[in-house]
Amino acid sequence: MRDRQAAAKVIKSKTREVLKQRFGEQAKDLMKSDHEIASKLENNKFDVVVANGRPYSAAHAISFEVDVPDRLQDGPYWRITDVKSRKTNFPIAIVLLPPKVEQDNYQQIEKAYQKNIDTYQELGADILQENQV
């Protein structure tokens, strides 16, 4: 089972790959890992920010393959809310690793997973699965 750190590695790797295919060697200058974006209340750190002098988009990952503490589920909520309060149309993606059926408390985690998808989308974030990055 992959945790949040593993999910972050997935998004970084896949983003790097896509940028390299599109922009070649320039890709390494466009992708910022664990990068902060200034927003209304504070700087918010995202797993990946695509920037060329200024940020163009941001992405953050969370894994529901493990039991996710509330504070990790709330993290993207606050990041999205804060950034969107200053930059309404700024593209933010949340990459989610879905729960696995074989998890002990699968039903409970599945409910939290669906609730977070709905919440993040209502806030204006794009929800991506691992294969959609």
Image (cartoon, grey):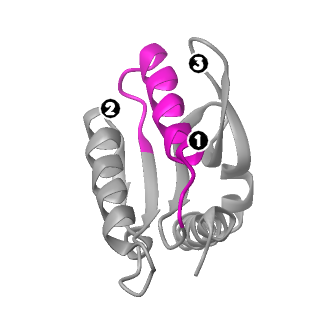
Which of marks 3 and 1 precedes in the sequence? 3
Q: Residue at x 64, y 72 (%)?
A: 13
Q: Position of residue 38 (x, y in %)?
A: 65, 21
Q: Quadrant of residue 43?
A: top right
Q: CA distance from mark 1 to mark 3?
A: 20 Å
Q: Do the CB atoms of the residues marked 1 and 3 lie less than 8 Å apart?
A: no
- Relative vertical location of residue 38 with respect to residue 90 in this rendering, above or below: above
Residue type indicated by callout 3: Ser
Which of marks 3 and 2 precedes in the sequence? 3
Q: Which residue is mark 2?
A: 123
Q: Residue at x 56, y 12 (%)?
A: 40
Q: Residue at x 71, y 49 (%)?
A: 32
Q: Nearer the viewer, mark 1 or mark 2?
A: 1
Q: Residue at x 46, y 59 (%)?
A: 95
Is disc 2 placed on a helix, strand or loop?
loop
Which residue occupies the foreground of this view, 59 or 28?
Answer: 59
Q: Quadrant of residue 51?
A: top right
- Relative vertical location of residue 114 with respect to residue 75 in this rendering, above or below: below
Give the prevailing secondary structure in the magenta stretch: helix
Which residue occupies the foreground of this view, 68 or 26?
Answer: 68
Sort mark 1 into few (<14), some (14-19) or many (20+) by Cα contacts within 10 Å: few
Q: Which residues are magenta?
A: 67-92
Sort mark 2 into few (<14), some (14-19) or many (20+) by Cα contacts within 10 Å: some
Is disc 1 placed on a helix, strand or loop?
helix
Res. 52 mark: none
Res. 71 mark: 1
Question: Where does the C terminus fall, quadrant-wise?
Answer: bottom left
Q: Which residue is mark 3?
A: 39
